[in-house]
Amino acid sequence: MLELLRRYLRPYRTKTIVGILTKAVEVVFEVLTPLVVARMIDTGVRTSNVGEVVREGLVLLAFAAVSYTFTFVCQRLAAQVSQGMGTDVRNALYAHINELSAADVDRFGTPSLITRLTNDVNQVQLAVALCIRMLTRWPLLALGSMIAALTIDVFLGSVFLVCMPLIALVFGLVMRASVPFFRGMQAKLDQISLVVRESLAGMRVIRAFRREGREDARGRAAINGHRDVAVGVGRLSAILNPVTFLVMNLGVAGVLWLGSGRVQAGELSVGNVMALVSYMTQALVAVTTMTNLVVVITRAQTSSVRILEVLDCAPTVSDAGNVPVDPLPDAAALELRRVSFSYAGSSAPALSEVSLTLGQGATLGIIGGTGSGKTTLARLLPRLYDACAGEVLVFGNDVRSYPFAQLRALVSVVPQSVSLVSGTIRSNLLWRDRDATDDELWAALRAAQAEDFVSALPHGLDAPVEAAGRNYSGGQRQRLTIARALVGHPRMIVLDDAASALDYVTDARLRHALRALRQELTAVIVSQRVAAVCDADKILVLDHGRMAGLGTHEELMESCELYQEICASQLKSEEKEAHHG
């Protein structure tokens, strides 16, 4: 946690120091209060001197007013520092997550990143606020009470010196045992986030398959797992307060027992004994509060480690040091040189020594069975992942030599999973080029076969889009994402099964529109449909990451057995559909 504070507390250093000093001033007046009460008892109550009682009472009121003023200032500064630092950490964490490569996000997991961005930062925020407000107050109050007690009477004050080490020993043992539990709690929160995210995203599918009971059981298991760990932490933490109260109350009893004899002997006044008891009680409350505070700090320490783990993760795919390079005018649009790739933790490569060359303005179709590596290859072109071996060249240059901004201006991608965000159609289409004109947006919609349904909407380009585009059909969402990819005049477009929700007629019109752009646009079409790739200039057939064939439709029908099987199976399916229809 100290490392996180070192990085992000600097802009709030002045407010932190002032907050600590104001709390120290409050403690000074609180430590002086028992002395005033002792004097009130000895010089006012014991002698029935009403004037002295009133005077000392006014002093106590003044002390209370000053303490309240400084407390208010401290509370305000603590809120400003904790909220400001928490906001800075959250912004930095969010920005860094957006810089991570797809492989890095896979390693952490989306639910875990969400938990770190929300719950873990909240834990740190809470700890910072409480440290400014309490970590100064309670240790100083305990120390001040001890010194004041020793000043009144060294013998009775020494009772503090016996109680404190015993409390510290119990405190250290419990905190040491609690740390693994706090780590487990954060991991359980990750699991809850994962289950809730999957359940909410797949609500329609869950209901369609009547899996509500199973999902409810999954949710209960995740929540109960978190509960069990939290109960374990609570049981350990519950040891602190009873033990602390036992030790300190025994100390109070000792002060009263020993003090009564000193009062009878005339060696100590009643007011002094009351002040000693008051200081013992203050120390009791201080130590008890510190035990609870350290629980918060321990959780924050665990959270800060998780936050720093993300912040210190160097992206495995980076464009650091890259400067813009000119695409070679006569080079191939795409060249793969013995490209291989494996996902982390996978026992088998997703791609193995794939090689091909595609000219500018040409169309490449990629087809194969599920898990054949089609999507993996599509992700290598815009450099969402880096090839483990071999080279991926786009317009004559290795993709690793381009700055990200330049490469992704050249290569536009339409992923398998449709990604629209809440806003309007216009705000979604402007992702690639914020300065695109309405004419350019309509041209992209026209090529994506989305012009008709967008123009029929009451607000046209300014029609609202709900989160994930839920207010549009699957085919409409796909066409909008294709239109977004065409905005900004990319030189290559990668369609990763991007027309799977389109009917055959709309799909054919889309491919015709892309062919019309072939003078300025190279297309890479990943699809399960033979009809989507059969008229491509080249078709790559993948089988478990390996090249099973490369050529035109006619060439593959003669030379590639796997392609023949795919064509035959789809032809039979279409014939059956036509017959039953």
Image (cartoon, grey):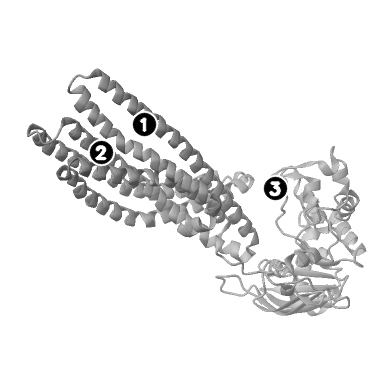
Residue 370, given in percent of the width and then of the height, sits at 67, 66
Q: Residues within 10 Å of mark 2 (few under 14, many from 20)?
A: many
Mark 2 to mark 1: distance in Å?
A: 17 Å
Query: In this orientation, does residue 129 appear?
Result: no
Residue 456 picture quarter: top right
Mark 1 to mark 3: distance in Å?
A: 59 Å
Residue 371, given in percent of the width and then of the height, sits at 66, 68
Mark 1 and mark 3 lie on one chain; the one further toward the N terminus is: 1
Q: Do the CB atoms of the residues marked 3 and 2 lie less than 8 Å apart?
A: no
Q: Amino acid at mark 3?
A: Ala
* Above or below for 327 versus 185: below
User: Residue 8, labelled with which disc?
Assistant: none
Q: Nearer the viewer, residue 40 or 533?
A: 40
Give the residue pinned by disc 1.
Answer: 63
Q: Nearer the viewer, residue 465 or 203?
A: 465
Give the residue pinned by disc 3.
Answer: 468
